[in-house]
Amino acid sequence: MAALQFWFEFASTYSYPAAWRIGSLTAASGVAVEWRPFLLGPIFHAQGWDDSPFNIYPAKGRYMWRDLERLCALHGIAWRKPSRFPRNGLLAARVACSIAEEPCCGEFTRRVYHANFAEDREISGAEVIASILDGLGQPSADVLARAESAENKERLRAQTEEAARLGIFGAPSFVVDGELFWGNDRLETAIEWARSR
Amino acid sequence: MAALQFWFEFASTYSYPAAWRIGSLTAASGVAVEWRPFLLGPIFHAQGWDDSPFNIYPAKGRYMWRDLERLCALHGIAWRKPSRFPRNGLLAARVACSIAEEPCCGEFTRRVYHANFAEDREISGAEVIASILDGLGQPSADVLARAESAENKERLRAQTEEAARLGIFGAPSFVVDGELFWGNDRLETAIEWARSR
């Protein structure tokens, strides 16, 4: 059985249902998840975009908001359209990067997505991130200091470069032994791919 | 129960598995299909694209070809990567538009997609389209003459404008009572939506 790399960006709308579904789906199949936060900004920039494609292409954006609302209803995931989109996920990504090997990374990730897409909270700020870490019983000041260290910033930068190298062009993406799957819709297929290796 | 409008463009790769799957899936649920060929060209043009986004954005294109190959394998649909992409689907769309209410429209549509994405045939030419019509026992010369009539050309043009009005930005799309679903991945959801109305 191969591990499943979950590549996500905190600003990404469809990464939200993926982050909420991945825990129970992989637990049921015994597949291990590797958390791979990265930044879509540089990847979109290389495609010539300086904003979310959902803002650049209004018809696509209108559809995405409606589709996500239906999708969350279907899966029983809480949903409120954020008053600001996209929110800057840099600090949250740095934290997730610094705790990627720790057991709390999954729950931290889910709670940040919930804050953004169900509670309409400003996840770009240190206060919201600190309150999520506190709620998980983590020493928020220490974790934030580690997240903002030069070494960890470089780690996230390198991880974003690796995403591009793997052919990732959007989020969420899943990688199993170099095989790429894009989108929340491919989560089950990617898990099955990992299970059968 | 509501009818399901299937909006498709013959150049569209993901419309191929949708066209092949829609028949048995809707038959199983008793949902009626309305065939809505349209042209992506004008819709992409309005988004600033003069080519398929799979050609404009190479990482997305590379992924699509691999994903489609996996998808066809999963569903047992024949697949060969076409040597030319996108092929011009104008003539095929005009024919489908002119026979949209006839029982042969579904099978004509499936065979054109098969010619493009499993046999690597040049569907833009009248010869290939005529041979498909002949294979269905249709009077190809008459059908092609009707397809190329001013009235039918205008019908396809109006249908493409309706697609834009409905918020369609890509293919395949499905519309049920004005509710839009985009992509082969949403076919089952759209059918369930139609079934429950």
Image (tube, coloured by chain):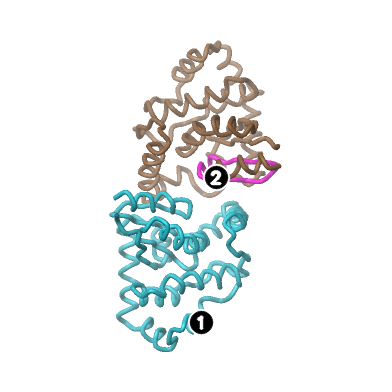
Chain colours: A cyan, B brown
Determine the residue positioned at 41% across, 32% down: B77
Q: Quadrant of residue A64?
A: bottom right
Mark linked to residue A50: none
For mark 1, what is the residue? A135
Mark 1 crowd level (few <14, some 14–19, many ≥20, 10 Å Cα):
few
Q: Is residue B60 visible?
A: yes
Q: Is residue B178 magenta?
A: yes
Q: Are marks 1 and 2 on the same chain?
A: no
Residue range (magenta): B171-185
In the rendered image, which residue does mark 2 sit on? B186
- Residue type at numbered disc 2: Arg
Residue B171: image location, x then y, percent: 53, 41
- Residue B91 seen in this snapshot: no
Residue A61 lies, in percent from the top left, at 58, 56
Q: Residue at x 60, y 72 (%)?
A: A120
Check the image and report above or below for A146 versus B55: below
Looking at the picture, which amino acid does disc 1 mark?
Answer: Gly
Quadrant position of residue B163? top right
Q: Is residue B15 above or below residue B57?
A: above
Q: CA distance from mark 1 to mark 2?
A: 37 Å
Q: Which residue is the extreme one toward the bottom?
A: A141
The foreground one among A196 and A157 is A196
Q: Position of residue A92 (x, y in %)?
A: 45, 75
Taking the magenta stretch, the answer to whether it contains residue B136 is no
Q: Chain of mark 1?
A: A
- Are the two marked residues, 1 and 2, in contact with CB atoms closer than 8 angstroms? no
Q: Is disc 2 placed on a helix, strand or loop?
A: helix
Give whichever of B111, B21 is nearer the camera: B21
Q: Which subunit holds the residue at mark 2? A: B
* Quarter of the figure with residue B153: top right
